């Protein structure tokens, strides 16, 4: 998977490649789907949700330019696979998921892998997680129609946020926080599940 789907494309960050080598994707997938675990595709994880395609996980992680001392917020824990990749690479990960069953399942799998640097919360990730802000990086893996203001406010100056934006058609957008303003850059077209709004 790492050689053909990631290195052969444009994934160059050695720490991303190493994390993707270390974390076993099949552990995050329901047993009857596991034979597909290392294919280049998203897979169903129950509750109408999906685990993202490995290339997209690597691409979004690389865009964040993560450093070992970073504090990162993830919105959409889902299977917990992306959470594990982040936990391999940074000091602390805060992960928010709106569906309690998915939070619980991910929490169990990740506890089994003995990560000590992940905090979980069930709730609306569009509101971020103020208590542990500011974040050096924010990654959102469900698509809002527009960029949630509350989330970008929780970025540290110089911090980077990657998220899919759009309703029918979505693009990955990179938001960077400058001294006085937020900068936005549209990257590639993607297809994510919609962000569930709590209100
Ligand atoms: N990164 C996950 C992707 C899961 S799909 C993985 O690779 O497994 C997107 C996830 O976002 C789903 O689990 C969905 O329940 C969750 N989600 C949707 N709306 C949300 C919201 N408002 N707040 C937090 N999580 C949300």
Image (cartoon, rainbow, N blue to C red):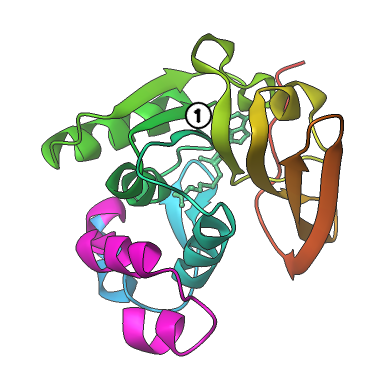
Tell me the residue that label 1 is attached to: 97
Q: Please state the horizontal and vertical placement of residue 14, each as a whole percent of the image.
A: 36, 70
Question: Residue placed at 49% from the left, 41% from the top?
Answer: 47
Choose between 31 and 192: the one closer to the eye.
Answer: 192
Q: Is residue 25 left or right of residue 133?
A: left
Task: Specify the segment rendered in magenta.
Answer: 1-30
Magenta-drawn stretch, dominant element (helix, strand or loop): helix
Residue sitting at x 52%, y 61%: 62
Camera-nearest residue between 99 and 125: 125
Percent of width and height locating residue 18: 28, 66
Determine which quarter of the picture holds residue 5: bottom left
Residue 91 appears left or right of 190: left
Dot 1 falls on a residue whose secondary structure is strand
Q: Residue at x 67, y 19 (%)?
A: 127
- Relative vertical location of residue 135 with respect to residue 86 in this rendering, above or below: above
**Any part of residue 130 in sight:** yes
Query: From what the image shows, is residue 33 above or below residue 112?
Result: below
Left or right: 92 with respect to 191? left
Q: Position of residue 164 (x, y in %)?
A: 72, 52
Which quadrant does the C terminus fall into?
top right
């Amino acid at each position: 998977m790492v050689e053909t789907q990631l290195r052969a494309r444009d994934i160059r960050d050695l720490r991303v490649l190493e994390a993707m080598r270390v974390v076993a994707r099949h552990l995050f997938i329901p047993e009857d789907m596991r034979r597909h675990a290392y294919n280049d595709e998203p897979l169903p994880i129950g509750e109408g949700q999906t685990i993202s395609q490995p290339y997209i996980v690597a691409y979004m992680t690389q865009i964040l330019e993560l450093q070992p001392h970073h504090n990162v917020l993830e919105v959409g824990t889902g299977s917990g696979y992306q959470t594990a990749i982040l936990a391999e690479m940074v000091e602390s990960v805060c992960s928010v998921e709106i569906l309690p069953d998915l939070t619980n399942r991910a929490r169990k799998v990740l506890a089994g892998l003995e990560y000590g640097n992940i905090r979980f919360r069930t709730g609306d990730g569009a509101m971020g997680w103020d208590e542990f802000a500011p974040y050096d990086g924010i990654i959102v893996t469900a698509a809002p129609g527009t960029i949630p203001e509350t989330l970008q406010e929780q970025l540290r100056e110089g911090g980077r946020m990657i998220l899919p934006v759009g309703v029918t058609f979505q693009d990955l957008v990179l938001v960077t926080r400058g001294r006085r303003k937020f900068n936005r850059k549209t990257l590639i077209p993607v297809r994510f599940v919609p962000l569930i709004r709590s209100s």
